[in-house]
Image: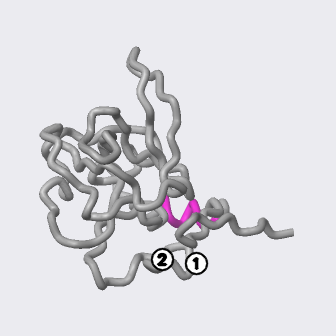
Amino acid sequence: MTQAATLSSTGFDLTPPTEPERERLEGDLTAEEARVLLHHGTEAPFCGGLLGEKSPGVYGCRLCGLPLFKHETKFESGTGWPSFYAPFDEDHVKAVRDTSYGMVRIETRCARCDSHQGHVFPDGPAPTRLRYCINSVSLQFVKAGDPLPDPLHRGDRIP
């Protein structure tokens, strides 16, 4: 029996990848991407490839391609990581309590594949006052007008 698709409010299939799909997706990662996405690592500040990206488009999960943030919500936080004040769709980003390193933080993960993206903090700009602090290697940028990557073959596209 197949699992019924769970759809986000913007129509994306949030059903987790099957084990064979996950193995295929993980096999395409670099060592650094795997360290961050799969093992909850953090890239060094001010070195990520998407930190200075200012083009119109969408930032999606590097592992499964799910859109996570719109370029309109990106802002310069001065922290050294790409920062956003709101997700593409609230359903696309999962919040998980993180007590590692003697701190209490909220980790952000992709709601579809559960890959580590970064953390969210309550010190961002209006209107949300949130700062999603995301690792560049956790994301892939898709310029406006370009098709979304669809590594799970689910027909992902911007509505």
Q: Position of residue 19 (x, y in %)?
A: 66, 60
Give the quarter of the image for residue 81. Answer: top left
Q: Is residue 1 left or right of residue 45?
A: right
Does residue 30 lie above or below 133 as drawn? below
> Which residue is at the front of the view, 68 or 136?
68
Q: Amino acid at mark 1?
A: Arg
**Point 26% across, 64% down: residue:** 71
**Point 44% across, 37% down: residue:** 107
Q: Secondary structure at mark 2?
A: loop
**Point 50% across, 57% down: residue:** 92
Query: What residue is shown with label 2?
Result: 150
Does residue 107 lie above or below 103 as drawn? below
The stretch in magenta equals 20-26
Q: Is residue 96 left or right of residue 148?
A: right
Count of numbered labels shown in the rendering:
2
Q: Is residue 96 magenta?
A: no
Q: Position of residue 119 (x, y in %)?
A: 37, 38
Label 2 vs label 1: CA separation? 7 Å
Query: Mainly helix, strand or loop, the magenta region?
Result: helix
Query: What residue is shown with label 1?
Result: 154
User: Marks 2 and 1: CB-CB under 8 Å?
Assistant: yes
